[in-house]
Image: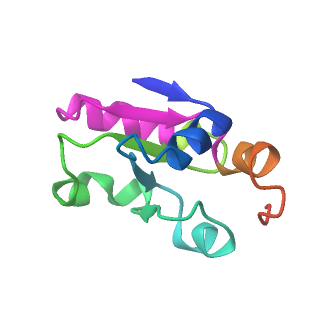
Amino acid sequence: MQHISPSDLNSWLQDTSRVAPQLLDVREPWEVALCQIAGSQNIPMNHIPSEQTRLDPDATYVVICHHGVRSYQVAGFLERQGFENMINLDGGVAAWADVVDPSMARY
C-alpha cells in the first residue's frame, strides 16, 4: 500500500496530464454529508466486503476516511483481495481540511 499526503493528492487531482485516481471514501453517510472531497465515491467501511464487486481491481484508488485509520484498514483489505493500486490518504479529510481546503467543515 502506498500513502499520499493531502497536498500531493491535490496536486495530482489538478494535473490534467495524469489520469486521476478513484477517490473511495469509507466513512459513514452522516460523515460524508458533513464534508467530502469532491468526486469521491462513498462506500462505508463495513459495506466494503459485500460491495467490493462494484470496484475495479485494476483502477488506482485513494482511500479516504476521517483521520486515515479506517482508510488504511480498507486499503489493506482490498489489497489482500487482489487490488494492486491502493493508496491511503494520510490524515484523512481532517488533514485535507487543514492543508488543502480550510473552508471544509470539520467534526
Q: How many marks?
A: 0
Q: Position of residue 65 (x, y in %)?
A: 57, 50
User: According to the image, what is the colour scheme of the structure?
Assistant: rainbow
Is residue 64 something one can see in this rendering?
no
Q: Residue at x 80, y 61 (%)?
A: 106
Q: 12 or 43: nearer the eye?
A: 12
Residue 46, quarter of picture: bottom left
Report the side of 52 relative to 6 (left or right).
left
Q: Residue at x 63, y 32 (%)?
A: 5
Is residue 62 something one can see in this rendering?
yes
Q: Residue at x 53, y 58 (%)?
A: 27
* Magenta-drawn stretch contains 82: yes
88 to 32, vertically: above or below: above
Q: Position of residue 34 (x, y in %)?
A: 69, 72
Q: 85 or 28: nearer the eye?
A: 85
Report the side of 41 relative to 85 (left or right).
right
Quadrant of the image containing the C terminus: bottom right
Quadrant of the image containing the N terminus: top left
Report the side of 94 relative to 72 (left or right).
right
Q: Residue at x 36, y 34 (%)?
A: 86
Q: Position of residue 4 (x, y in %)?
A: 55, 30
Bounds of the magenta segment? 71-92
The residue at the far front in this view is: 17
Report the side of 63 relative to 105 (left or right).
left
Q: Position of residue 90 (x, y in %)?
A: 61, 33
Residue 53, quarter of picture: bottom left
